Image (cartoon, rainbow, N blue to C red):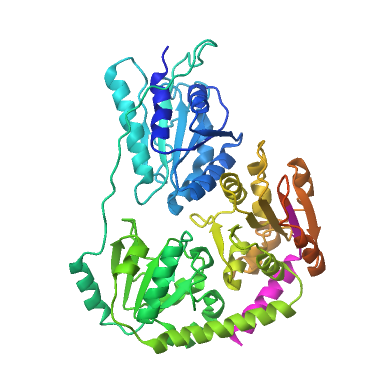
Amino acid sequence: MTLKHINDIVSVCAGHGVETAIISPGSRSAPITLAFNAHTSIDVKVIADERSAAFIATGIAQQQKKPVVLVCTSGSAVLNYVPAIAEAYYQEIPVIVISADRPPEWVNQYDGQTIQQSGILGKHILASYDYPIDDGHADTHWHGNRIVNEALIKAMSFPQGPVHINVPLREPFYPSEAKQIKFDKARIIKYTAPDTRLIPSLINELESEWSQYESMAIVIGQHDQDDELSSAIEEFCKRTGTVVINDVIGNQHLIPNAIQHHDAFLQPKIQNTLLELKPDLVISIGKSLISKNLKVFFRENPPKAHWHISQSDRINDIFKQLTRSIYLEPKHFFNSFKPASGDASFGKKWTEIEAKAKSVTSEYLMKCPFGEFKAITNCIEALPENSQLHLANSMAVRYANFIGLNKKLEVFSNRGTSGIDGSNGTAVGAALSQNKMVTLITGDMAFFYDRNAFWHPYEPSKLRVVILNNHGGGIFRMIKGPQDQPDYDKLFETDQPLTAENTARDYNFEYLSCTDLGGLTNALKGFYQPSEGPKVIEVFSDSKQNTEIFEAFKKAIIA
């Protein structure tokens, strides 16, 4: 039996620039696995747990800015990809899912490892394809080649994202020992993306509309670090007097006068006293925003207009006031659009309240008792320049958004779906795919939930993990609603007695722990020194005291 049509999948992936394939072992997927492993241009990593494999692949694709292939066997294996694929969909990260399947005639016949895999990833992929079973006809090979080319093009076009190729296979599918896997030259269909730019007529239209407004603000949601974009926004703001509001995952925190403490001073209790901060026009870029306070402020005090700039045809109406969706790379927009200046006094109002919030935050964190808030502050201060900071969901990413950043760091977080699953895996993928130091700051629930991200033979020596262990889901104490319920401890806190020491030993991590500031300071001294494997610091604190510290901080900001 020839498996040329399977080998062609690999050739087309390599032809489109795929460098990495993450394999989870299985029998039905053997021909696909063997073919990827035989190709000299593709690095194959084997991760047993499909859920962790998918998050690691997402982390690698995020760093490489190229598609990464995921391969699994038939049956429930592909369902384990769903959390990471949903994350990749909303973060617009190109991941190519290739699932082996039983032949179609055996579906729903109670045969082993046989489920309905066609279209199984639902609406969280850009496209789903059923690869043809090889019947020896020339058109079958042509059809399969076209499908893989189309899948790669779809994944890499904007908005980027995951695609799924389901590959049914009949036995026999193991090559004989003497049979060597050969790759014939495959047809690679090149795709030329449209050249999008601001045409003169649109510039005139935007300038005319701009002239109707007096106060403007740029809001930056989740976005890659981009020095060209930062420079373009900085020059645009100097020229026009526009305010820049940057969430910590926006990665534009080094723009002069960027507002970073908006989550602290835009608290619901005082929003009605801050109406002078409402702009006439909001220009947004990036994807999700962490700050609920910012979203509520603009939803309840809507600007006159909202323009969203992105290379996507998705309508991002986050403030319920969208008036323009402009399909363009943001840095091209800010370099090309040169309107008249706005109200300089408006920007001064934002920078004055930002300076106050920054000062109060700094003073409070120096004096407050030791807990998660102070610990994460000291960990961020210790981060090496030009390194990566990965923030798990729940409190880690929220604390960081209150604190702000003042050094050159790349910040990542799984804010596509904002789940706790996969934070370890995404950070591991980042550490395995580039040479920068990667620090993951996470909570105990997120860390233990995703322990299988470390269950593989690869040792990311530049991975550092800080675990904020309060022995439960402490975030629910800080959310209005759960904490007022009579069965709060049972239903929300998720009391758990584990520490990370045994996990660190299992996976050959260097382990340190602390319960106070002196212990954390000592642990951080050699934390970023070179090592053969990863390192972890576990910071123990009390959940109730963390809540008290954080509530006192919020009161201090608005006092």
Please identify the quarter of the rendering in which residue 342 is found: bottom left
Whether residue 558 is visible:
yes
Query: From this viewpoint, which residue is outermost toward the left?
Result: 201
Q: Magenta segment, which residues?
A: 536-559
In front of the other: 128 or 517: 517
Seen in the picture, residue 335 relative to 52 is either above or below; the reply is below
Please identify the quarter of the rendering in which residue 53 is found.
top right
Q: Along the line of sight, which residue is nearer the eye, 323 or 412? A: 412
Measured as percent of width and height from the top left, residue 197 is found at: 26, 61
Residue 344 x, y percent position in the rendering: 39, 87
Q: Is residue 339 above or below residue 450?
A: below
Give the percent coordinates (x, y) of residue 22. 54, 36
Q: Main secondary structure of the magenta part?
A: helix
420 or 464, which lies in front? 464
Q: Residue at x 33, y 14 (%)?
A: 136
Give the left or right position of residue 524, taking residue 54 as reference: right
Would residue 520 appear left or right of 455 to someone viewing this image? right
Provide residue 413's location: percent of width, then percent of height.
55, 57
Rendered position, 263 above or below 103: below
